[in-house]
Each structure stands twice: as C-alpha cells, then as structure tokens.
Image (tube, grey):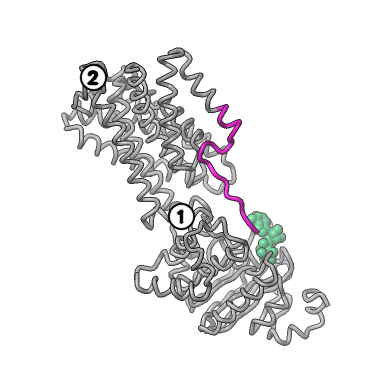
Amino acid sequence: MLNFLTYLINGLSLGSIYAIIALGYTMVYGIAKMLNFAHGDVIMIGSYLIYTGMITWGMHPVPAILLAVVGCTILGITTEKIAYKPLRGAGSSLAVLITAIGVSYFLQNLSLLIFTANPKSFTSVVGWEGVSLFGGELKIQGVTIVTIIVSLLVLAVLQFFINRTKQGQAMIAVSEDKGAASLMGINVNRTISLTFAIGSGLAAIAGALLCSAYPNLTPYTGAMPGIKAFVAAVLGGIGSIPGAMIGGLLLGVIESLSKRYISTQLSDAIVFSILIIVLLIRPTGLLGKKIQEKV
Amino acid sequence: MAMLEIEELNVNYGMIRAIRGISFHVEKGEVVALIGANGAGKTTTLHTITGLIPAAGGRILFEGSDITKTPAHRIVSMGMAHVPEGRRVFANLTVLQNLKMGAFTRKDKAEIAGNLEMVFSRFPRLKERQNQLSGTLSGGEQQMLAMGRALMSSPRILLMDEPSMGLSPIFVNEIFDIIAKVKADGTTVLLVEQNAKKALSISDRAYVLETGMIALEGRSSELLENDRIRKAYLGE
Ligand SMILES: Nc1ncnc2c1ncn2[C@@H]1O[C@H](COP(=O)(O)OP(=O)(O)O)[C@@H](O)[C@H]1O
Ligand SMILES: [Mg+2]
C-alpha cells in the first residue's frame, strides 16, 4: 500500500511537470493554431540557463530560475517573430510544423555547440529534504512536493489571468476569431507574442523542476518530456487549459504506476496506447469541446 | 467633408480583382445601404474599410484622415465599429464578456458601465442572458449581441454586414427597429444587406454593387421605384 502511495505521489509530481509543459503547448496551439514542437527544447535551454547561473556563476537558485524564465521568454518571443510569424496566413499549417521541427533541431545543435554532449549533473533547485511519514516507511522528497505545489499555483494564476484580466480575455478572443478580435481593437500579433512568452516562461519553470528530479542535463533532455507533454495536451483536449493539467497529471500517474506494476520498458508504449484509445473514443480529448454554431 | 469617403478602391484576392475602382461616401447622420447579389463584393468592401484585408489601390478617408493602411485593431478607437457578416461572437465567452470585449480599447469604467446600461436597455434579452455562453444563443440573439458589442465602443459610424441574414421574420423586424434607433441617436450607419427592400426602406441613400463595381446609386426612396432594382433585387 505504502509502495503504491509512493509511486502515485511520484507520478503526480512527474505529471505536474508534464502539465506545466502541456500548458505551454495548449496555449500556443489555442492561439496560433500551431504545434510548437520546439517547446520541449525551450525547457532544455531553460535548464542550461539555470545550470549556468547556479554552477558557473554561483547564483542562488531563485535568481537563477528568474534568469531562465526571462531568457526563455525572450527566446519564445524571438522564435515566434523570426520563424513562425512570417508563415502565418501563408495558408499551410504544414510549413509552420516543419519550421517548428527545424527550430527544435537548431536549439539542440546550438546547445551541443555551447555545452557539448557531455551530460551535466544538475543541482536540485529545491534544498529541502522532504518529509518522512509512517516512521520512515513513506518518504516524499522535497522536490516532489514542491513540484506539485508549483504546478497547482501555476494553474491557479493562469486561470485567474485568463478569466479575470483584459489581456486574458483578449487571448480567448484571439484564439477563437482573429478577425473579430482585431475589430474589438485587440492587437492580434501582440497577443500571440504574449502567449509565446507565457508558454516559454512556464517551460523554464518546468525545466527547473524536471532537472531537479532527474539531474542529468543534455541537449536532448527536453525532447522526450516535450513529446509526453504534447500527448498530455492532446489527451486533455488541445486548447483546453484544465485539459492540459488533467492530461499531464494522468500521464504522469499512468507512467509511474505502469513502471512499477507492469514494465519499465513498456511504460512509454502504455502511455501512447492510452492516448490512441482515448482519441478513438473521444477525438477531441477529455475536456476538448466543440461548440456547435447555431444559425 | 464626408464622414466616410471611398475613392477608387481596388481589392484583390490573389490574382482576382474583387473590387474594381469603386467610389462612394457616407455623410454624417446618414444611413447608407450597400446592396447587391451574393458575391458582388459587399463584405470585401467592409473588410477593406476596417483593415481586415488590404486595399490594392485607392483611398479610404474617415473624418478626413486617411485610414487606407491603418491596421484593423486601430480602427475601433477612431470611432468606427464593424458588425461582421455571420455575427462572429466569441462563443466561449459569456454575453457579458463579449460586450466588454466591445469596449476593449476604452479606459473609462463609468463610461463603459453607462454603455452597458444602454445596450441592455436596447436588448433586454441580452441582459437576461448575460451570464450565458454566447455559443449557446440563438442566431437572432447572437446578432443582437454582435450589434450590442459594436455599440459598446460608442462608435460614430457603424458598419453592418447582413444583420438580417438567416433570421426569422420577427428577428429581422427587431433588428431593423434597432437600426432605426441607432440612427435616431445620431450614429451614422453603413448597412450591407441582401434584404434590399428592408435596406432601401430604412436608408437615406444606397449604392448597388455588381461584380465589384457600383452599378447604380441614388436616394433609396427613388431606387425603390426603379424598374431595374424592382426586377433584380425586389423580386417584382
Ligand atoms: N477569401 C477569399 N478568397 C478568394 N476570393 C474571395 C474571398 N472572399 C471573397 N472572395 C470572392 O470575392 C468576391 C466578393 O465576395 P464578397 O465580398 O464576400 O461578396 P458579398 O459579400 O457581396 O456576397 C466573390 O467573387 C467571392 O467569391
Ligand atoms: Mg457578404
């Protein structure tokens, strides 16, 4: 039982990381109608920034994370401006998709060049040991608890921003109808930029948490979590913020429990099979919705 | 000086020229109708005026200033609102949130509240349904919302694209009543309509658009008597 609990909590923690990444995927998809396959690599860049800040420059974890958030935000806005925006309205979503894959390889190769392929050993940004329950039978690491709390906090702030602020409402409007949104006086390009900024900033936070739990940092660190988070976003219903959260948590728990009870090697296959089954039953994902237009 | 002046406007879709050198004007306080068959270029004209699509040539002057190249998101704060064809309300936002979107560029909270009162008194149905998601409204209610949303910016000129399209006769009458009230309040209106009879009876002047060119223009009361109009657009 305690063993199950341990794996469940670890799954929730891993799922929280997927969820934070998935939020970026889903927001960018919702507004720019593109799958930003370079999103996972932004996590990796963020992690290297934190690593450089903490190890090379000896910074405290908090300013190092802030540095990474700022760096990733700038990176997100810049890639959108240079690589994606010129293709917007070109009529081919395939062109943007291929560009995103190109950006992904570019970021990986850039890191190879700067940081080499040698894995860097990441120092956890969470100094706290964690808690020990049931006379030491159940140990929960500090980083595990912090990860879960941070992701809930991120979700709450995001929900507040989207539903209660003007800029957030503008995002919903732009994601639904860019033309109608601009007739309201909303600057569509700036709103898309802002979305990339938020998504990339979240990626930096995800990077800090991911590398604290799995401290092996290479230029490919972001790739697999990126794809898993994409799966989580689709599972929850791409474009839906609560969907990304639920999809991420679900994915983390399934992965963790299948590693424990079924097979370590097969856990990824199980995760992807579940995605396929859910999409067969509900093509829009768990919380994805299609509002019918009434005439 | 006309409130809205269109000079020799050309608009292309790729290689195809949809609008071919049209000129027309709307004076302050007027209701001007733009009528024409499906595909004549009415929507294209409105979209070009509010900057949703670029002009290939010609000029658009609003209250004397050249807005030909002004991006769409700058238009509403200049005093021009556009109720687009097909209503295009934000389905995932509530009625109230949609109306607030209409006042997006405005800062003065008291003025926004005043406008909301005005819209609610004009469209009591919207007040009843203010917390409902707009995607769940009927077509007629969505049209009212689209009009209410545009009025939230207190425009000096209102552009409306086929507000009666696909609506039941009761709603059509209601929509035209509102247009009459908007005019009575002193707002200038450029009205695009397929319902030529209604449009000509409510407007002061009208232009008839045929394949991207203005085929006929004049006082609406006279156009209602015009043989060609009666045959082609009034089904008589
Ligand atoms: N996005 C578009 N791409 C290409 N052609 C278009 C587009 N929109 C409209 N058209 C063409 O431009 C012409 C005018 O269309 P439109 O302005 O929608 O007419 P109306 O509003 O009078 O029905 C039509 O021939 C139409 O097929
Ligand atoms: Mg039209």
- Locate residue A111: give its quadrant: top left
Between circles 1 and 2, the one closer to the viewer is: 2
* The residue stretch that appears in magenta: A276-295
Q: Nearer the viewer, residue A41 or B235?
A: B235
Is any atom of residue B17 visible in this view? no
Q: Chain of mark 2?
A: A
Instruction: Confirm or reject: label 1 Cβ below 8 Å from ligand 1.
Output: no
Q: Does the magenta portion include A285?
A: yes
Indicate left or right for A133 with B123 as reference.
left
Q: Chain of mark 1?
A: A
Could you say whether the residue bearing mark 1 is in a helix, strand or loop? Answer: helix
Q: Quadrant of the C terminus of chain A?
A: bottom right
Q: Nearer the viewer, residue B89 or A226?
A: B89
Is any atom of residue B84 visible in this view? yes
Q: Residue at x 31, y 21 (%)?
A: A214
x, y percentage for residue B74? 45, 65
The amino acid at mark 2 is Phe
Disc 2 marks which residue?
A: A134
Q: Quadrant of the N terminus of chain A?
A: top left
Distance of mark 1 from mark 2, alpha carbons?
54 Å
The amino acid at mark 1 is Val
- Locate residue B178: give its quadrant: bottom right
Q: Residue at x 54, y 85 (%)?
A: B184
Q: How many marks?
A: 2
x, y percentage for residue A94? 57, 37
Disc 1 marks which residue?
A: A188
Instruction: Please tell me how crowded label 2 is: few (under 14), some (14-19), or many (20+) other residues with Cα within 10 Å.
Output: few
Instruction: Confirm or reject: label 2 Cβ below 8 Å from ligand 1.
Output: no
